Amino acid sequence: MSSSLRFPKNFIFGVATSAYQIEGATSEGGRTDSIWDTFCRVPGKTHSGHTGDIACDHYHRYAEDVQTIADLGVSSYRFSIAWPRIFPEKGKFNAEGMDFYKRLVDELEKRQLKPAVTMYHWDLPEWLGQMGGWLNRDVSKYFGEYAETLLHHLGVQVDTWITHNEPWCASFLSYGIGEHAPGHTDWREALTAAHHLLLSHGEALQAYRASGLGGNIGITLNLGAVYPASSSPEDVAAARTADGFTNRWFLDPLFRAQYPEDMLEKFEARVGRVDFIRDGDLQHISAPMDFLGVNYYTRSVVKADVTSEFLGVGYVPSSPDSQTDMGWEVHPESLYRLLKRVASEYTDIPLYVTENGAAYADVLEDDGQIHDTARIAYVEGHLAAAERFIEDGGDLRGYYLWSLMDNFEWAYGYSKRFGIVYVDYDTQKRVLKDSAKWYRELATKHRTQLV
Ligand code: IFM
């Protein structure tokens, strides 16, 4: 069970979650609907009509959950704040909502657990959804005010802030592909939303610098490693395009103050002039950050496919033998390559793996245990890739396992289990899976030996 992995002294082992996926209590404490509450009520949008109404009931069980995190021996917990708890209506601050997060942060502090807080993990207040959501440029201003409020109330206790989680999902998957709330299928909208999300990141960054707080602020991107299926010029070009809309569309504005030319051309040919990008926006978006969060799960292999609506990119399915329960190929080597690429092509600021983990169809055995050996192998393989990146001189400061516990996996509802802690949704009982015990051993060894 033990592992030979070794990380630098200050390396952070953590676990991650997000508000809508675990909290439940969607109409308690003054919270109003988010766009995800609305989306879940639309028949057919989530697996078996699952919603986040109860989720893991973390809103009521947060103290027990923080104890579980402490018992895992990790040093940090990444969670997100539900915007509609803080601003349930336009212009109305909800002290009760903020109080929940203060209590959570206090619990973490008592146990010497470092909070890493994501400001936005997709649960946009429905009242902003009604105003057009991320298609409305003003939403980035509202986000700036929301960020300012969070910093005012929690900024002293929290020194690691993540403005957005995976803006690709909040734009392309939500407004272009339609799999996530609000479920639109319009590529012009996807690009507009992506731009406004980035703009709002700039607003939050500005609020952070103006606050005079001395911690760290960054953004988390879901980046992928893209490989051409063959060396044919067509497949190589398809891989470049896929890399363009997955990775470069976000990395380039953040680190180079420009959108990639080749992608601009392709997108404009499809959706018309991207006139929602205004003068000065890119300077705002590219203001220096303190770190970059990288979420990595899988790689993609692509080929040219003229019939594909993804700008002619066809995705080649991987072998079922090497897939997780999401159908995602397990490919740790790509994490190493991805980190190397970000560091060599984009930035020398510190990196964090802010999410990595795997869904498997876990079974609670008769002995009351969950023997999730595949998940242990997944995590160990990816940590080995992270270790190699550091040994090569890479500045990777931490690894957050997704996820602390099984939770609401968006359109897949509760049908996919990513947790290292099993959740029995009938009783809300939490059971440590074998992977949790393995991670506990690793994190504890790391903390006590500090090598
Ligand atoms: O559950 C999600 C999370 O909310 C964002 N990153 C990917 C995870 C697994 O799909």
Image: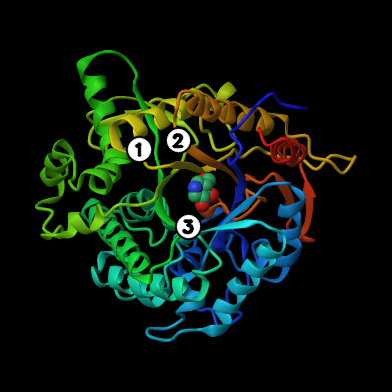
Whether residue 244 is visible: yes
Residue 262 vertical placement versus 274 (above, below) = above
Q: Residue at x 28, y 40 (%)?
A: 245
Query: Which is more N-terminal, label 2 or label 3?
Result: 3
Q: Is mark 2 within 8 Å of ligand 1?
A: no
Counting other residues with Cα less than 10 Å from the Cα at mark 2, is it few (<14), some (14-19), or many (20 or more)?
Answer: some
Q: Residue at x 71, y 53 (%)?
A: 69
Asked whether, in this view, residue 70 is left or right of residue 215, the answer is: right
Q: CA distance from mark 1 to mark 3?
A: 40 Å
Residue at the outermost bottom position: 92
- Front disc: 3 or 2: 2
Residue 342 percent across, percent down from the top left: 35, 34
Task: Evaluate if marks 1 and 2 touch, with contact meaning CB atoms under 8 Å apart.
Answer: yes
Number of dots carrying numbers: 3
Query: Which is more N-terminal, label 2 or label 1?
Result: 1
Counting other residues with Cα less than 10 Å from the Cα at mark 3, is it few (<14), some (14-19), or many (20 or more)?
Answer: many
Q: Residue 383, labelled with which disc?
A: none
Asked whether, in this view, residue 91 is left or right of residue 32, the answer is: left
Q: Circle 1 is placed at which residue position?
A: 348
Q: Amino acid at mark 2?
A: Asp
Whether residue 331 is visible: no
Asked whether, in this view, residue 54 is left or right of residue 232, the answer is: right
Q: Amino acid at mark 1?
A: Asp
Q: Which quadrant of the rendered structure holds the C terminus? A: top right
Residue at the outermost right position: 367
Q: Circle 2 is placed at which residue position?
A: 395
Report which quarter residue 239 is drawn in: top left
Residue 285 percent across, percent down from the top left: 25, 56
For mark 3, give the secondary structure: loop
